[in-house]
Amino acid sequence: MPELPEVETTLRGIQPYLEGRNIRDLLIRDHRLRWPIPDGLSARLQGRLIQRLTRRGKYLLIHLDQGTLIAHLGMSGSFRMIDPEVTPRKHDHYDLLLSDQGCLRFHDPRRFGCLLMAEHHHPLIEHPLLKGLGPEPLSDQFSGDHLYGVSRGRTAAIKSFIMDSRIVVGVGNIYASEALFRAGIHPLRAAGKVSSRRYAQLAEDIQKVLQAAIEQGGTTLRDFVNESGHPGYFKQTLNVYDRAGEPCRQCGQPIRLARIQQRATYWCGRCQH
C-alpha cells in the first residue's frame, strides 16, 4: 500500500506538470473506486485553474481556483503523466486532461483509491477525510514530546500507536517497523510504558526513515510505481520489514515476525526491547 513517502514522491513528480495549468476535462472510465466519483464532476472541473498541490497524510490535495480535489492512491494506485493518445490499460480509471494537452492518468487495479471534490465555501480542514488527523511527521508540530504526551495511559502496542493517523499521519506499516528498529523499541511494548527519552529518539528516527524513503522514491513491495512508472528503491535498505528469518543487519539474530491487529510486524529480539 502506498504510504507517505510514496505519496510525497508522486506529489513532487506531478507538481510541475499541474500547477498553473487549466483543466480541460475529466475523462472517467470507471466511477467505481472506494467511493464513487461524483456525478457531474467532469463538468464542474472544466476550465478550473490548478493553483497548487499539497499533501495531507496520504491524501493528495489539488487546490483549484474554486474548490479542492482530494485524491488517494488506495492500496495499489498510481498517477502517471502521459500522452492522452496512449491507449489506456486495464484499470486506468480516469484521466485529468489539461489545457496544454497534458494528461494525468490514474491506474488502480484494486480500486481502493478515490477522487472527491471539497467545495471552496467549506473549510478544507473540516472535510470528513481530513478532520481529526494528527500532525505531519515531517513538520515542526511533530516531536517526541507530542508522542510522549498523548501516549500516557495508553496500553496499545507502540507500533499500533504510531500508525494511528489521529496521533501522527502517514507512518504506515513499513516505516513504523523500520523506525522502531532504529530506535531499539520492541513493537509490542505498551505505548504508555515508553519513556520521554525514547520517544524523542523514536520521533527523530521516524523523520529520518521517512526522509530517506522519499529521497529514494519510496518502497516497492508489490504495486507502487512513481509518476514516471519507475519503482522506489527504499526496499533495498530495509532492516527488518519483510525479512522474517533473515539475519539482523546489526547483530545477526533472525528477524522475528508476528501480527499486530492483522498487520505483519517485524523486529529483532536482541536489538529491540
Image: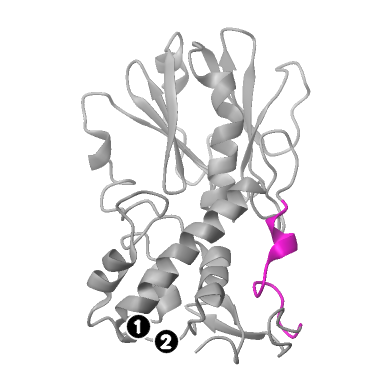
Where residue 48 appears, as percent x and y from the top left, is: 42, 12
Quick one: SS at disc 1? loop
- The numbered mark, 2 or 1, whose residue comes first in the sequence reads 2
> Element under label 2?
loop
Front in this rendered view, residue 268 or 108: 268
Residue identified by numbered label 2: 189
| Three-letter amino acid code at the position of disc 2 | Arg
Q: Residue at x 42, y 71 (%)?
A: 201
Inspect the image, locate mark 1, and give the three-letter code of the amino acid beneath it: Val
The part of the chain drawn in magenta is 233-246
For the point 51% across and 68% down, the residue is 176
Say whether marks 2 and 1 touch (CB < 8 Å).
Answer: yes
The disc at residue 194 is: 1
Mark 2 or 1, closer to the camera:
1
Report the coloring of the rendering. Answer: one colour
Among the 4 quarters of the image, the one containing residue 101 = top right
In the image, is residue 104 part of the stretch drawn in magenta?
no
Q: Nearer the viewer, residue 178 or 200?
A: 200
Query: Does 200 appear above or below 192?
Result: above
Q: Is residue 228 above or below residue 129?
A: above
Q: Report the side of 44 relative to 214 (left or right).
A: left
User: Above or below — where is 46 with respect to 64?
Assistant: above
